[in-house]
Amino acid sequence: MMGMKKTTFESFDQMADATAAALVQAAARSAFQLFRDRQFHLLAGFEQLSKVEQDRIFNELVAACIVLIMLVLEAPDLRVADEFHSYLSGLNKKVPRAYVDQLRSLGIEAKYLRDWEKLISMRYEEYARDRHEVRAAAMQIESSEKALDLDDLSKIQMLVPVQTVAIGCHHHICRSKTEGRDELFKLILKALSQFYVEIRVPFEGRRITPFTRARVAVHRMLRRMRTGKRDKE
């Protein structure tokens, strides 16, 4: 998973440590890929931003990817065997520490490691809380078009983690000034959606069908946003 080498582990705890390390490496890689994207630079207004502000934005992208991993691991609709949930719960707790350990191995000073621990904890608490509002809003929007069936509810539930994190990340990157920055949000949502699939599919044994439906739902949401934008023009 996530480029891990085939290794013989002596315990589940050792396997969880290795998996957490691989997951946060994938998170950093995904965040860096978006951070380096030319369209992202343009939409985020990098030319007008200081190096400190650019670094802050990168940190928000990394934190978003890490928290998204955590929300996937605790998602109630994650399709794994019942006995696997306790392992995922333990793995979830190891993810923040795995990233801090990775930074420590790179020689990052202790004070910055503490800052990272606080940032990840704050964003996890925030996004975990906000997902309930995002779910309610999604249900309200979908039910305004037609009566919801089980498939609709399943897709809404599946998209809650990535939508919640994308909304929060966009909010923090823009320092709450999100008016007129829908294109930046859509780019963030697209990147996080790709990472979400990359993370979640392996845990579910590569059963891709639910994600096919989820991606359709993401595209529908993006089309709705584009239509709404044209209506305002």
Image: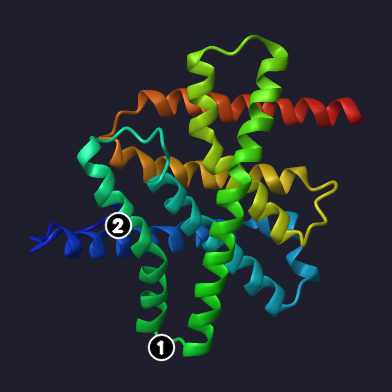
Q: Residue at x 46, y 48 (%)?
A: 71
Q: CA distance from mark 1 to mark 2?
A: 27 Å
Q: Examine the rendered structure and indicate whether residue 12 appears above or below residue 154.
A: below
Q: Nearer the viewer, mark 1 or mark 2?
A: 2
Q: Residue at x 19, y 63 (%)?
A: 13
Q: Amino acid at mark 1?
A: Gly
Q: Residue at x 7, y 64 (%)?
A: 10
The residue at which mark 2 appears reads as: 90
* Colour pattern: rainbow
Residue 84 shown left or right of residue 89 in the figure: left
Quadrant in which residue 83 is drawn: top left
Q: Position of residue 68 (x, y in %)?
A: 49, 51
Q: Position of residue 125 (x, y in %)?
A: 56, 58
Residue 39 visible to an observer of this rendering: no
* Residue at far top of view: 147
Q: Examine the rendered structure and indicate whether residue 213 appears above or below residue 159.
A: above
Residue 134 visible to an observer of this rendering: yes
Relative to the observer, which residue lies in front, 18 or 129?
A: 129
Q: Secondary structure at mark 2?
A: helix
Residue 131 shown left or right of residue 71 in the figure: right
Relative to the observer, which residue lies in front, 110 or 23?
A: 110
The residue at which mark 1 appears reads as: 107
